Image (spheres, rainbow, N blue to C red):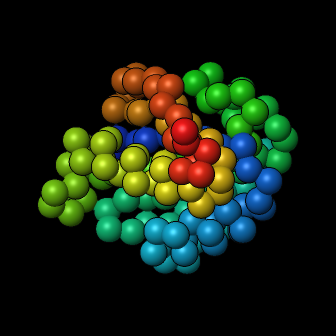
Amino acid sequence: MEFDRIRLMLHLAVDCPLSLEEFCDAMRHRFGLPDFEYACENETEWGLVKHEGIDYNVSRPYKRGTLEEWDGSVPEGCNVGVTLTAFKDCPPGQDADWSSAELVERIGQGLADLLRRQVYHHRTWLGAGKNVTHQRVFLPKSSRG
């Protein structure tokens, strides 16, 4: 990945029993995304799709606890990581403020409602060595009081 082209990366996590393909298919239908491409290595499998200047990367490690090992900001128990990468050349109106506010809200809340699970926005990557940790939790609408 060409890091100099990246505006920011939004990191979400969830504890979900779905397989990678089931998760990505549900996400594709919910957000009107093209088909995901899949790959794997010894510790994880992932799905990736690019749509309207945003990369959607879903990672599902084979072993629980791996996401927390890789990234200390991942809430305990999460087994699926979703990274939304916004590029500097994404469509007009989708600047860094839009990405960090509207994109994370749309995807985070949409996933929480779709999966009926808590979804965590735990980190935003702004560049080499520039990370902002978050403790934002999206709750499924049915569980809000």
Q: Residue furthest left?
A: 92
Percent x, y for residue 78?
71, 38
Q: Does residue 4 appear in this view?
A: no
Q: Residue at x 22, y 41 (%)?
A: 97
In-front residue for pair 74/105: 105
Classify residue 93 as left or right of residue 102. left
Percent x, y for residue 125?
40, 33
Percent x, y for residue 119?
58, 42
In-front residue for pair 61/112: 112
Q: Residue at x 46, y 23 (%)?
A: 133
Classify residue 79 as left or right of residue 24. right
Q: Residue furthest front?
A: 145
Q: In the rendered view, tell whether residue 18 sits above or below residue 9.
A: below
Q: Does residue 49 appear in this view?
A: yes
Q: Residue at x 72, y 27 (%)?
A: 76
Percent x, y for residue 64?
82, 38
Residue 128 found in image quarter:
top left
Q: How many marks can you see?
A: 0
Q: Residue at x 40, y 24 (%)?
A: 132
Q: In the rendered view, tell whether residue 98 sits above or below residue 125.
A: below
Q: Identify the image quadrant of the C terminus.
A: top right
Residue 18 found in image quarter:
bottom right
Q: Residue furthest right?
A: 63
Classify residue 123 as left or right of residue 59. left
